[in-house]
Structure formats: structure tokens, C-alpha cells
Amino acid sequence: MQINQILVPTDFSQNAYLALDYAIALAKQCSAKLHLLHTPVIPNYLLMDLSYSPGPEAVTRILNDAQEALDQQSQTIDTAGLEHFTVIREGTVHEVIRDYAKEHDVDLVVVGTHGRSGVSKFMYGSITERVLKTVHTPIIVVPPKGDGVPSSIVIAYDFSAPAKHAAEVARAIHGVCHGSLHLVHSYLDVWGEYTDRGAVVGEAAEKRRQALHRGLEGMLKDDANELFSIDAQAIQTHLVTGDPTAGILKVANDVGANLICAGTTGKSGIERLLIGSVARRLLHDSEIPLLLTHQEG
């Protein structure tokens, strides 16, 4: 795949500006077009048993203010010399993002996160899980410290279809940004606790432990060669045990990665990202951008 269209939803927060800067840097590498999208919030007020909505003048003022803020962000893209589009669309945020991405064949969505409160504060707050569940276009979540183009990429890999899709997107990004690629698989060391249970049990457990490690190592290298046949020399494989999130983040730190990629089934929202709760923790704990892909993306 190639990255030709990048969508940046914005709420004009500082985090949205950081996400835009990230998208601009990536778009330059990919020679991609940028789409800057804002969904204005038209407030509703509850007065006793009645619902009150702003009148036409108030709505016009909200839209005018949004357009002015959008024009200011657009100037940043102009300065970068990129072809771009700016759009205001009313509606439910996650549905607007989903529909716009489909209509314009968007290859990648880039959004900002507040970081310390993790996914609960991502972009528009409470609609995060809906965005991650309904928007099947690959999404890069950019935390406050996540600047710069992805020169070193870690792929959290569990041999599933979503993980393979994440690897395909990572390959597309690597194709224009280059750098190093790292395929990381976390597994349960089921025989580790038996290796010190005496000579007979311990020896047998250690043999099975080593066999499991070799088998997974071979599977991981085979998939790496298949997924990255052109860049096979550029990719390194890593097997980690113990806490999956900690293992993935440790590899990312050790290799100086500035992008982590993972897959999601999307069937039950964020609960099914990667390997259950791992993606939730990655979103909360990672200080570098996180790319999430849907298996149907």
C-alpha cells in the first residue's frame, strides 16, 4: 500500500496542533495530501424538562469561529508546501471521521492525545472508543512527546490478521521514512516455572522451554520474511515474556523506536485491541506515537 491521503481531525487544542505537525512531517515524506477536518460542537442546554439549542446567530458565530481557527491551522500546511483540504462538517464526531475517511479514500488518520490520562482523554474524550471501533482506517495516536517522523518502528505482532495489517501499514511508512523495523512477539513462558523442580522435571521443562522459543522464533522470522520480503535485511525479530505491554515498551525504548504499531479486531471496541488490555495500556503508557489498524481497514 501507499499513503496518499492523510486525515487530521482537529478540535483546535494544543494536542491537535501537535498531531498536525506530525501529519505534516509524515505527509512530506509520503508526498501525501492532507485533509484537515473539524466537527463543531453545537451545545444543547437542559432547562427543567425542556431542551434549549442556540439560535441561528449563535450557531453562525460558532461556525465562523471554527472556520477562522481552521484557516489558521491551514496556514501551517501552506507554509509546508503541501496540497491540502480544510473541511467543517456537522454531526457525530466518530461518524463524521468514519464517513469522510471512506468518501475520500483516506489511507491514514492522525489524531492527538492528552497523554497522561491516556485513551480517556484522546482527542474528544468520551468518543474515543467509538472512533477506534468504527473508523476502520489506520489511526496514529500522537502523545505530547511524540514528534518527528517514524524512523524506527516496533510492530506488536501476535500472528493474527489484524497484526499482519499493522505490519503492512508499517511497511508503507518504512518505505518512505526508512530506518529500522522490529517485529515483537510476547508469549507466555509456560515451562519457566518448572525448570528448577529437580533434575528430571527441570531438564524436561528446559528442553520444552527451548523448543517453544525456537519454534516461535522460526515462525516470527518466517512471517517477517513474508511480510517484508523487500526489506528483510532491515527487520529484526524479538521474543519477550512476562508482561506484554512492558515487554513491547522495553523493546521500543531499547531500539529508540518512535512508532509502535498494533492491530485491532474492532468487534468490541478498544477491549479487543491487540491482545485485550495490552493496547489500552499501550495507549496509556506509551510516550511515542501508536499506530492502530483494524482488520477490515
Image (cartoon, rainbow, N blue to C red):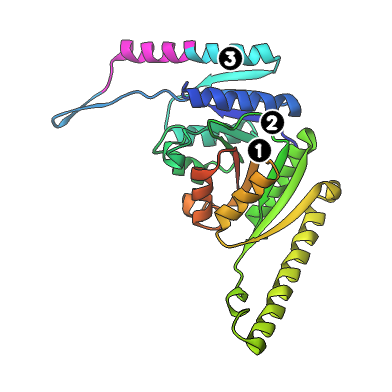
Say whether disc 2 or disc 3 marks the residue closer to the N-terminus. Answer: 3
Residue 67 part of the magenta-drawn span? yes
Is 19 displayed left or right of 91 in the figure?
right
Q: Residues within 10 Å of mark 1 (few under 14, many from 20)?
A: many
Say whether disc 2 or disc 1 marks the residue closer to the N-terminus. Answer: 2
Residue type marked 2: Val
Is 188 displayed left or right of 176 in the figure?
left
Query: Residue 244 location, x and y as percent?
Result: 57, 57
Identify the main secondary structure in magenta. helix
Q: Residues within 10 Å of mark 3 (few under 14, many from 20)?
A: some
Residue at image position (51%, 44%) is 285
SS class, disc 2 = loop
Of residue 155 and residue 54, the one placed in the foreground of this image is 155
SS class, disc 3 = helix
SS class, disc 1 = loop
Please state which of the two labelled residues, at mark 3 or mark 1, is closer to the viewer.
Answer: 1
What's the distance in space between the residues labelled 3 and 1, CA to CA?
Answer: 26 Å
Q: Quadrant of residue 31?
A: top right
Where is mark 3, residue-wise?
A: 74
Residue type marked 3: Ser
The vertical placement of 115 against 213, above or below, is: above
Residue at image position (71%, 56%) is 238
From where the camera sits, is residue 239 visible? yes
Residue at image position (72%, 34%) is 3
Q: Which mark is residue 258?
A: 1
* Residues shaded magenta: 53-68
